[in-house]
Amino acid sequence: MGAYFLMTIYDQIKKALFPNDRMVIAITGLSKNAGKTSLVNWILKHYSVYRFGLTTTGRDGEDKDTVFGTEKPKVLIAKNTIFTTFADEIKRNPHCYEVLERTRYKAGGKDIWIVKAIMDTEAEIVGPASVTDQKEIIERLRILGASTIIIDGSLDRKAVLLNDSIQAMIIAAGANYGSIEMIVKELRRLQILKSIPVTKEFSDKTEFISLYKDEWITTNLMSLLGNEKRFLELCHEYYPDRIYIPGAITGKNWHNLGSYFLDFHGEIIIKHPFNLQLDLVNVKLMQEEMDIKTIYPFLMNAIAVNSSAINGNHVDSEGLASTIREYLPELPVVDILNIE
């Protein structure tokens, strides 16, 4: 550990996110206005040796936040970066870009274009929301000359969570989420989700809850929500060895089914760890007492902290960073407001 902390933050992030020059890296946040754009700008600036491709699961770099109406930082596109945007952006600064391709993909009903920056500039980036389209955009960026791909995403979007092209993820933890205690509790919860083993023996071809007893039995239940009683009836009828739950397990589900899950001696398979919508205490209990597997892994390779909040409830920057390092010492933590 001592040698690790002798490394500069740049080296720590490089080791965590860039083990090779063909990585696909997602940048996500615990909440809106977590500092993702500032983080993207920092990465593009300090790791300029890589041939970056840049896209997003929605929009980034627009003038104002569509929810809060606050001013947003622009994405600072470095020269030679290949990225996805709208035609309006190209028309606004045509001298800044080499147009590479008009794609068949859309965002907000508008066509997505792929361009290359021929000088340092500011721009809005856009991208498709579906997993399939996002994976195809990654391939187009690669074919057109990008090597390392950055996706500005969101933890609640399938295009990030279910995209198996993504190889690393850095999470922006900002004061907009809440107090230092709230931020650290959520990151500790996510670290447990990260630790859930991945199974290669089951595919997510069905959206229905399934039970295994000699063979997989489809229950025709798409969700536990409102179906807890029927789910228990089926479990007591078949006495399964394995259970596949493709949807969420919420606090309400846990209240009704937690005792059954904790007494269940078989394997429970979930589609993605983020489907465990439980607090830190119950996620930890589930991890300790249950044999739980996931089809898709949850990635968390580094943390970026942002002590500023748009509502004025700022937190102590050093206090936030040092507390996260205390609880998650294996992850590099970068303070995006106090680095150059």
Image (cartoon, rainbow, N blue to C red):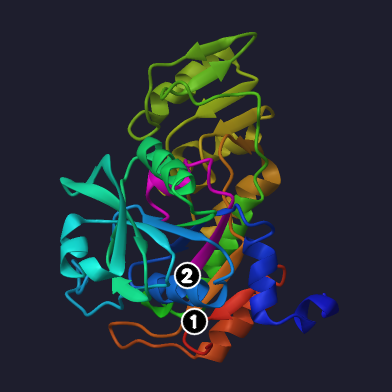
Q: Residue at x 55, y 65 (%)?
A: 187
> Where is residue 317 drawn, in percent x and y?
51, 89
The numbered mark, 1 or 2, whose residue comes first in the sequence reads: 2
- The furthest residue to the top: 214
- Tell me where the magenta segment starts and ends, as one range: 154-171
In the displayed structure, 156 sits above or below 97; it is above
Q: Is residue 331 something one can see in this rendering?
A: no
- Residue 313, picture quadrant: bottom left
> Where is residue 15 drawn, in percent x and y?
70, 66
Q: Residue at x 52, y 88 (%)?
A: 340
Was residue 220 drawn as part of the magenta stretch in this picture? Answer: no
Q: CA distance from mark 1 to mark 2?
A: 9 Å
Q: Which residue is the site of mark 1?
A: 336
> Where is residue 132 drawn, in percent x and y?
39, 35
Secondary element at tag 2: strand
Mark 1 belongs to which amino acid?
A: Ile
Q: Are marks 1 and 2 in contact (CB under 8 Å)?
A: yes
Q: Which residue is the site of mark 2?
A: 172
Q: Residue at x 57, y 72 (%)?
A: 47
Mark 2 belongs to which amino acid?
A: Ala
Query: Left or right: where does residue 149 sit relative to residue 106?
Result: right
